[in-house]
Image (cartoon, grey):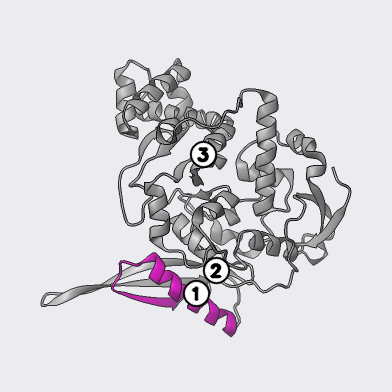
Amino acid sequence: MTTSRTTVTTAGLGRALLGRQHLLERASGEPVPLVRHLVGLQSQNPPSPYLALRDRLTGFAHADLSALVASRRVVRLAVMRSTVHLVAAEDAHVLAALSAPRLRRDLRGNADRRADLEGTDVDAVAADARGLLEDAPRTAPELGAALAARGHPGRPDTLAMVARCLLPLVQLPPRGEWRRSGRTTWTTVEAALGPGPDLDLADPAVRDSALGVLVERYLAAYGPATVADAQSWSGLTGLQPVVDALGDRLRRVRHERADDLDGAGTRPRELLDVPGAPLPDADVPAPVRLLPDFDDVLLAHADRTRIVPAAVKPHLASKNGMPPPTVLVDGRVAGGWRVERERSGGRGSARRETAVLRVTPWTAWTPAQRDEVVAEAEAVVRFWADDADGHRVDVDPPAAAG
């Protein structure tokens, strides 16, 4: 591994992350190259990638991504962290194969499911599920019922989960298209996209090589970072030998904590990076951005202090597992937002719906920062609620941490 080192501060790490994410300056061009650069966009909530791309691309319109979803140039499937991501079609096979160990581990991730699968041959269930789904796309209830009808022991919902965890399953459109609803309907990645690249990922050497490429792509989009960060983002374990094997393909970056915004002390640590990746100055201006829920910029590190101040972490906690959409001010999470619908009119007059984007500060903002938040929120509410008759932005009083 190269011995050359660069020193970066916590604030500098934040600017590096935002720069590589195109959150300092929007990129130009088509969505697919950006989706590939980011490796994927988390997409449990199907509309979320639309705002994530609007935050990062100049001139982005809903139809740009809807057309890609409809044509399957991008697809939605469970990959990193066993969560649904929007990924480019050319990445889907390999990402699914590399993520397979995490999904298999998650199959028995709760006691109820483990008990229900006692005595079930899960590989036989997966083989039957593959045949069923490649014969015709099915929803989870339809697939579970069909597997139960074939005599596999277990509840239908558990049998469907076996397929979800052991097979690379694509969620088919219209789900994922803007303003189009539909039940989650699965088929296999091979049925949706055809055969994948000629890679024998069962060969440990081939798999480690592919994991090395994944680590390099991660660092290009989210670095500098540690092995623990890469494992947190990917949901995979055992990446240290993969990183060691990359040798001089990586550079070392020294994180000097003397300016640590959360007062974590001055002990430096060593981070990994890809040569030539940008490291903007720590004082480069960072524009306000309103991020969707589950934006990967907030989920890509074990240590998130570069973008999430300790004081706002309690605001990101969620009882139902759905974190709030967030506001970035000066490059760090500083508030949350939500859209509410107000309806007026009725008898004798046309009904009218106003979309209200409510912003809640979690930190102290200057008047100039507040004005910048409101201006960006006015653009976002028109994008996010493009079906409303009217739009408004309200700023709530600052919220205390719970």
Question: From what the image shows, is residue 239 above or below residue 175?
Answer: above
Query: How far apart are the two marked residues, 2 and 1, measured between alpha carbons?
Result: 7 Å
Q: Which residues are magenta?
A: 367-394
- Expressed as whole percent of the image width and height from the top left, the position of residue 382 reads 39, 71
Pointer 3 residue: 92
At label 2, counting other C-alpha atoms closer than 10 Å, the crowd grade (few under 14, some 14-19, many 20 or more) is many
Q: Amino acid at mark 3?
A: Ala
- The label on residue 289 is 2
Question: From what the image shows, is residue 288 above or below residue 27?
Answer: below
Q: Amino acid at mark 1?
A: Glu
Query: How far apart are the two marked residues, 1 and 3, measured between alpha carbons?
Result: 33 Å
Along the viewing direction, whichever of 393 and 178 lies nearer the viewer: 178
Q: Which quadrant of the view contains residue 34?
A: bottom right
Question: From what the image shows, is residue 349 above or below residue 220?
Answer: below
CB atoms of marks 2 and 1 within 8 Å:
yes
- Quadrant the C terminus occupies: bottom right
Query: Residue at 50% of width from left, 58% of height from top?
Result: 30
- The label on residue 376 is 1
Along the viewing direction, whichever of 262 and 285 lies nearer the viewer: 285
- Expressed as whole percent of the image width and height from the top left, the position of residue 381 reads 41, 70
Image side of residue 20 versus residue 269, left or right: left
Query: Residue at 44% of width from left, 73% of height from top?
Result: 379
Query: How far apart are the two marked residues, 3 and 2, measured between alpha carbons?
Result: 28 Å
Which of the marked residues, 2 or 1, is nearer the chain's N terminus? 2
- Expressed as whole percent of the image width and height from the top left, the position of residue 287 reads 60, 73
- Expressed as whole percent of the image width and height from the top left, the position of residue 222 reads 66, 53
Q: Amino acid at mark 2?
A: Arg
Q: Please say whether residue 110 is one of the residues in the magenta stretch.
A: no
